[in-house]
Amino acid sequence: MRSKDYGRDVLSGDWRRPRKGQIPEVAAEPGLVAEDPASGFCGAVVACEKDAVTLEDRFGKRRVFPLAKAGFLIDGKPVTLVRPVRAAGPARSASGSIAVPNLRARVARESRIYVEGRHDAELVEKIWGHDLRVEGVVVEYLEGVDHLPDIVAEFGPGPESRLGVLVDHLVAGSKESRIADQVSSPYVLVTGHPFIDIWEAVKPSVLGIPAWPRVPRGIPWKEGVIAALGWKGEPGEVWQAILGRVRAYTDLEPALLGRVEELIDFVTAPRSG
């Protein structure tokens, strides 16, 4: 008597090569329990990279497995683990602020921020340029602070035309601090960082150096730095190379970050009363 033919065994064959659409994809979220059928290792997801997932069993042992198609079991059923898709947060500008999409620069305020030189202005623009265009603030440079009191008088600061000034090497007893002390107006804020030059505000690690070198008195600082580090080129060329390494506010020293943010807040403050 011939037995009834029920066809192919539904449990036979390679379940790792299922027909299209049979095996569900499951996001490898932390805490998800999955099993590697080849080794029998079972554990919770603790990490998931582009091509691999890390499982940790109840004894604390961890193993890394590739994210193969139909490569895991959940509750005894084959699944394909995939890297979780994270919800995109708001885009950020180089300063860390929330970027305004399709920005059209605001009409420039009468208020201004002055910085000492071209290099200072270029660095401020690279990190805070988006923020400044949102607020309609123009950055100009002084080419030194020797004539700061005269420049402030000519600017004519007032409630609707505030002036913020960023000074290099603004430390107690310095020439810069003595000049800054000559400026007294509720509509002017003179602040600064302790660095000899704006170059020093870039973290050494960004440039692959252990620290900024000390330059002996009497030697121009930029040229002394270039020589001490064995760099090639004129200061302007070297600065462009330095600026090219700076991507975001995290590449700068906090002593500069705080002062620039303070100036932006000051010149954009609403008129009191």
Image (cartoon, grey):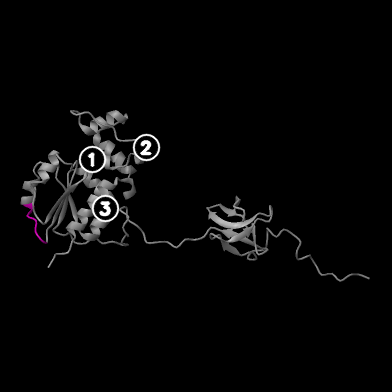
Give the percent coordinates (x, y) of residue 262.
Answer: 22, 54
Q: Nearer the viewer, residue 175 or 137?
A: 175
Quadrant of the rendering where the C terminus is positioned: bottom left
SS state under label 2 = loop
Give the percent coordinates (x, y) of residue 216.
Answer: 22, 28
Snapshot quadrant of residue 90? bottom left
Residue kind at label 3, given as amino acid type: Trp
Residue kind at label 1, given as amino acid type: Phe
Q: How much space separates mark 2 and mark 3, taking CA atoms?
A: 24 Å
SS state under label 3 = helix
Between disc 3 and disc 1, whose residue precedes? Answer: 3
Left or right of 95 on screen, residue 262:
left
Residue kind at label 2, given as amino acid type: Gly
Snapshot quadrant of residue 9? bottom right
Q: Are marks 3 and 1 in contact (CB under 8 Å)?
A: no
Image point 28% across, 36% down: which residue? 238
Q: Residue furthest right?
A: 1
Image point 68% across, 55% down: which residue? 40
Decide: few, some or many residues near mark 3? Use Cα within 10 Å; few <14, some 14-19, many ≥20: many
Q: Residue furthest front?
A: 59
The label number, if any, that marks residue 128 in the structure image:
3
Mark 1 vs mark 2, foreground winner is 1
Decide: few, some or many residues near mark 2? Use Cα within 10 Å; few <14, some 14-19, many ≥20: few
Q: Nearer the viewer, residue 247 or 217?
A: 217
The label number, if any, that marks residue 208 in the structure image:
2
Q: Can the viewer see residue 248 in this picture?
A: no
Q: Is residue 163 magenta?
A: no
Extent of the magenta region: 154-159
Give the percent coordinates (x, y) of residue 86.
Answer: 47, 61
Residue tagged 1: 195
